[in-house]
Image (spheres, helix red, strand yellow):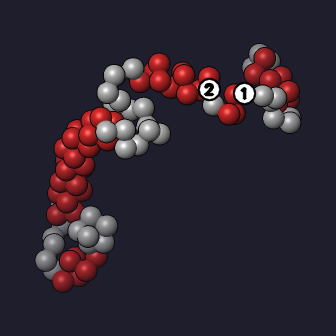
């Protein structure tokens, strides 16, 4: 609550100039600490198979490449109008 809506505390005089910066820095620090523990736990128990960041094997880029190869967007016919986009990619700017 301090981070998301500190206005009431400023109006009451409880917080002074510079305190919001300290709150924001403390929030960032806590998020970083929680993230160090959360990502390995989530990946270890496969609770979020959508993410490849911090996976158990450490093969982030290999996983991304495999997901791109097997994505439904990369199988079958290209989308209508894709040929126009290919012309843009092939042109020299």
Q: Quadrant of residue 75?
A: top right
Is residue 25 something that shows in the picture? no
Left or right of 5 on screen, residue 67: right
Is residue 24 something that shows in the picture? yes
Q: Position of residue 22 (x, y in %)?
A: 17, 57
The residue at the point 62 percent across, 26 percent down is 70
Q: Nearer the viewer, residue 2 or 47?
A: 47
**Which residue is at the far front?**
45
Residue position for label 2: 70
Q: Quadrant of residue 86?
A: top right
Q: Position of residue 44 (x, y in %)?
A: 30, 35
Q: Which structural element holds mark 1? A: loop
Left or right of 37 on screen, residue 93: right
Q: Which structural element holds mark 2? A: helix
Left or right of 89 on screen, residue 25: left
In the image, residue 18 sits, relative to residue 62, either above or below, namely below
In the image, residue 68 sits, relative to residue 19, either above or below, namely above
Neighbourhood count class around disc 1 (C-alpha, 10 Å): few under 14, some 14–19, many 20 upward:
few
Residue position for label 1: 75
The residue at the point 86 percent across, 35 percent down is 81
């Amino acid at each position: 609550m301090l981070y998301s809506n500190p206005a009431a505390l400023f109006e009451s005089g409880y917080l002074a100039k510079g305190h919001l910066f300290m709150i924001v820095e403390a929030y960032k620090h806590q998020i970083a600490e929680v993230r160090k523990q959360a990502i390995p736990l989530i990946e270890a128990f496969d609770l979020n198979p959508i993410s490849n960041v911090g996976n158990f094997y450490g093969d982030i880029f290999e996983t991304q490449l495999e997901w791109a190869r097997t994505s439904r967007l990369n199988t079958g016919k290209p989308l209508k109008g894709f040929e126009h986009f290919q012309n843009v990619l092939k042109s020299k700017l």
